[in-house]
Image (spheres, grey):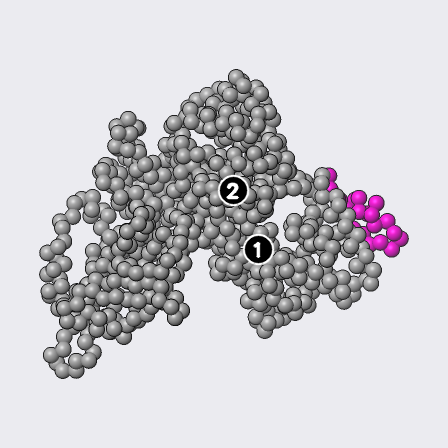
Amino acid sequence: MSAVVITKKTMMANEGSSHQVFLIREVEIVKIDPTKKSRFRVKITAGNEKPTETEEFIIDRVGVTPKWAITKSLGLDPLTKILWELHGRRWPLSRFKVLGSVEKTLEELFVLFEGNNTSADIHLLDGSSEVAVLKISGQLDTPKNIMTDVVANTKEPSESSKLLDGETLQRVFEVVKQMIDTLAEVHPAATVAWGFLSIGFEVVKNQRDTKQAIFDLYADMISAYEDFSKDDILEQRARLQGIYNSLFKQTIECAIFIEGYAKKSGIEHLFEMDVSGQAEIFRQAFINLKRQLSMGLAKEAVIVTLGVQKSVDVLVMRDHLRDLRPPQALGPKSWCTQGTRIATINMMVSWIAQCDGGTMWCKGLAGTGKSSLMGTLHELLTTNIGGRSRLAAFIRYDRLEFSKANSLITSIAYALGVFDDRIGMAISLVVQTLPSVVSLPPSPQFQFLLRNPLKSLPDLGDGGPLVVIIDGLDECDISNDMLAVLAEGFGPKLSFMRLILSSRPVHRVATVFKGRECIYPLHLDTSSESVNRDIHFYLERELAMIRNDAFQEKCKELDAVNELTARASGLFIWAATVARFVHAFPGISRLQALLDTNIPSDATEALTILYRTALDTLVSEPGVNADIKKYVRTVLGAVLVTQTPPGMTEDVLDNVILVGEDSPPSRHIVSMLGSVLSPETKDSPIRLIHKSLDDFLQDQS
């Protein structure tokens, strides 16, 4: 389709001047400076309207010219400013960057196409340097001539193309996207469902031989979203939370089914399950959801899922799995604050949905929120991505509680076996026939315990992606051989498996992972705009929770949220520590102490300044005993050197460490250090809040 731009020749003042219609037919890159980017798109913003972006064009061979058709009406006012941007990226899931841009008014475009000109060049700049040239092809004529030409070249749509008509889908998608934005904070699965809905659309649009049953299924799914997007329904979103959750989960299951269908060849379709029958089951699920909505039912509905498991002798199978001797697993350490890290989470979920048996390496400095991301992903995969869990295994390492990596592969195998009885039967058979598998080197152990059993179950691929997460890879004593095995992942023959690794970019891990095509690196950039925005959101929320008028006035006076965000250097642990620090009395003096520090030059300096400021403030506040610094040092030192189990407790502090006649009770010191220490609980001793504090306390400088 083509975009229509109606302008007026403002230089003509007589009554003979008429409206002209500018029809844009094509945009093409005719010149671009050398760049490593191989994926491009054009973004057009007309005045205050929502920007329009072209599809991504991939240059996969020499001589290919990026070219797009535009489907955007740019407005009527000749003074409207049109911003043209060229975006590029190197990798499929990396962020697009603006390579060059230029702003033109509609009147300037009108002049370029005066006479018989059918194309014009627009020069894009990066600063003052030209980086690319876009060729805009179009036609300037009267509305009657333009419309006659457009109608004459319009083909009669088929039933299938009516479903995928760009104008109709654009309208529906805009409504659905507004619904998703409205519900995102209440329903964690909303943005995830939107990603799968979009993927399903691309699959259906690009399949030339798609069965009518698939088209009908997608049409019913879109129809359900239209009903759920109505204003009167959205106003009841709190009461209807259960039925909305069902819609999102059903969408994900359905999109996985559609994508799985698209990945099979025509020959494979002949031998696969009854596609029409399965599609009809999913269709009925969406029809039932619409019916429940119309009846005002708020309860979660039963979800139609993929991958029906066979009946097996579970007790015998699990008895064999216990021969793998799995250690006690650690659960997630933390979770992202709701409303933060949305872009990163969506990127990870998109990778899960589209990748084929690859490995993602989520890397970042200490304090950048890696474990919180893994915890949030754990929650999403377990409860919100479809009608059943997608998380097949979760392994978290901690250098104090769990750092032995020799049982990593057997732990994954055990988790997979417990997750799905079919996998459990296949793995237990290996354990029975090859008892020595538990002591094999990493490569053959991975092959025998994981790859071979999974390959023996071809039906697993019909159930959608299964994810294995390993958090804190830098926290364990993992060998180079084991790292090499993880770098290869499950491989393309197990395209439904996903492996996600999380660690700091330490040398021993980076050396093994560097340059491997099967690894997708996700770098948590502390300087990115989205990270700073999330930290700002978090600090704003935390400071607003302090119910003290004087404190709130001081925050406004000092522009506290913005100033603290600038000092965080993109570190979430910095923001979390600050929140704990200022929440304790007296809040204003502590806030002032933090804002009196200089803005750090990097993340390491940010943490150093924070910990030093916090500790100095704690021991110098009004009313604090002059000897308190000695006791603070004693307690911090005791906790630092006894971090391995069983760790330090208040009882040990009172009876062994703080034994002087004037020594304060340990609970007083631990409470005082609440911003940097986690207090003793029934299940854990006193702990430093983060390993970065451990590094700070041991830094001799």
Q: Can you give x and y, in whole percent of width and height, for residue 382 in the image?
A: 48, 39
- In this orientation, which residue lies closer to the viewer: 196 or 324? 324
Using residue 448 as the reference point, say whether residue 668 is left or right of it. Answer: right
Q: Is residue 276 visible?
A: yes
Using a 10 Å C-alpha cutoff, classify the residue at mark 1 as few (fewer than 14 neighbours), some (14 to 19) or many (20 or more). many
Which residue does the image show at 72% across and 57% down from the upper left? 701
Using residue 642 as the reference point, say whether residue 150 is left or right of it. Answer: left
Q: Which residues are magenta?
A: 646-666
> Do labels 1 and 2 touch, CB within 8 Å?
no
- In this orientation, which residue lies closer to the viewer: 664 or 602? 602
Which residue does the image show at 20% across and 56% down from the upper left? 1
Q: Can you give x and y, in whole percent of width and height, for residue 562 in the image?
A: 55, 67
- Circle 2 sits on which residue? 513
Q: Can you give x and y, in whole percent of width and height, for residue 412 in the image?
A: 53, 32
- Circle 1 sits on which residue? 572
Corner quadrant of residue 585: bottom right
Using a 10 Å C-alpha cutoff, classify the residue at mark 2 as few (fewer than 14 neighbours), some (14 to 19) or many (20 or more). many
Q: Is residue 289 above or below residue 534?
A: above
Look at label 2 and name its amino acid. Phe
Corner quadrant of residue 124: bottom left
Local SS, label 1: helix
Mark 1 against mark 2, which lies toward the viewer? 2
Look at label 1 and name its amino acid. Phe
